[in-house]
Image (cartoon, rainbow, N blue to C red):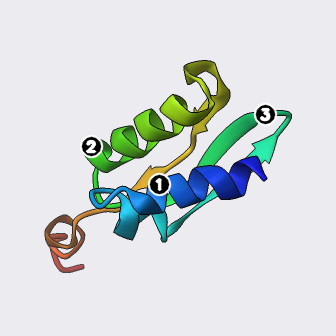
Amino acid sequence: ALTLNVHKELIKDPALAVIAERIWLVTIAGKVTLKGQVPSYADSIAIEQKTAQLVGAGNVDNKLEISEPASVANSAPPA
C-alpha cells in the first residue's frame, strides 16, 4: 500500500508526473527505494524530496540513474 500511495502522489504532481510514470519504487520495511532513469540530476532530487515528504527523509534510498543527454551520447569521435 505504501508503494502505491507514494506513486500516486508523485503522479499527482504536475512537475513530476511524466518522470514518475517511468520509474519504479520498491518498499521494504517502510523504506522506499527509487529505481529507474530520469532526465537530470534535478529530476532525481525532486523525486527524492517529494518521496521524503511522504515517508520521511531517512526512509528514501535514491538509486535513480541520470540519462545521458543525446548530444553527449552522439558526440563521441568516430572509431
As drawn, the label of residue 10 is 1
10 Å crowding of disc 2: few (<14), some (14-19), many (20+): few
Between disc 1 and disc 2, the foreground one is: 1
10 Å crowding of disc 3: few (<14), some (14-19), many (20+): few
Name the residue furthest right. 29
Q: Amino acid at mark 3?
A: Gly
N-terminal label among 2 and 3: 3
Q: Quadrant of residue 33?
A: top right
Q: Amino acid at mark 1?
A: Leu
Residue 22 place in picture, x, y as percent: 49, 70
Q: Amino acid at mark 2?
A: Ala
Q: CA distance from mark 1 to mark 3?
A: 17 Å
Which one is nearer the viewer's eye here, 69 or 76?
69
Residue 37 place in picture, x, y as percent: 46, 61
Name the residue furthest top. 58
Residue 15 place in picture, x, y as percent: 27, 57
Compared with residue 10, is residue 21 higher up or lower down, i.e. above or below? below
Contact check, label 1 and label 2, Cβ < 8 Å: no
* Residue matched to label 3: 30
Q: Which element type, helix, strand or loop, lies under badge 2?
A: helix
Compared with residue 67, is residue 51 higher up or lower down, i.e. above or below? above
Q: CA distance from mark 2 to mark 3?
A: 25 Å
As drawn, the label of residue 42 is 2
The residue sitting at 24% across, 70% down in the picture is: 73
Contact check, label 2 and label 3, Cβ < 8 Å: no
